[in-house]
Amino acid sequence: MSFAKVIGIDLGKSTFHLIGHDYSGREIFRNKYSRAKLVDFLTVQESTVIAMEACCGAHWLARKCKQFGHEVCFSQNRRSSTRAPY
């Protein structure tokens, strides 16, 4: 059985889309979870790197992930300060 080296999370209001890659970079899972099921899923995973976009809900999830021993990385927001507003 291969374990996820990196888990990417697309944050949503009520559902979260996950993708996991192993040490060779191959996709090993792609799932959709509710908030409660996501926390349950992360508790049983081995310590790994979790990547997500920095947004208002990300910091709550990052604190949860760190409690479970995961390393959290935030990606840049799609809107950066160098772009003109809308």
Image (tube, rainbow, N blue to C red):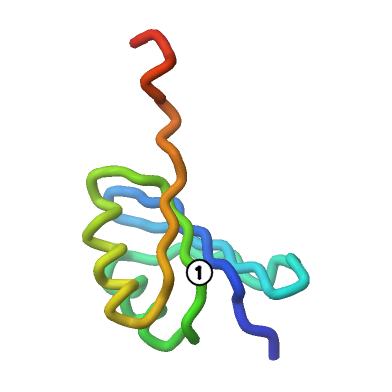
Q: In which quarter of the image is residue 33?
A: bottom left
Disc 1 residue type (three-letter)? Val
Q: Which residue is drawn at 44% across and 30% down?
A: 78
Q: Does residue 58 appear left or right of residue 72 in this picture?
A: left
Task: Please state the horizontal and vertical placement of residue 48, each as a whole percent of the image.
Answer: 51, 76
Instruction: Answer few, some or many: residues within 10 Å of disc 1's Cα (few below 14, many 20 plus, some between 14 and 19).
Output: some
Which residue sits furthest front? 82
Residue at the location (31% across, 63% down)? 62
Query: How far across and down, in percent of the image, does residue 86 sit?
Result: 36, 9
Taking 6 as reference, is 53 left or right?
left
Q: Is residue 6 left or right of residue 24?
A: left
- Report the residue marked by disc 1: 49
Position above or below: 29 against 77:
below
What is the quadrant of the N terminus in the image?
A: bottom right
Residue placed most toward the observer, 27 or 78: 78
* Residue located at (41% from left, 64% from top): 72
Q: x%, y% of residue 36? A: 27, 72
Q: SS class of the residue under badge 1?
A: strand
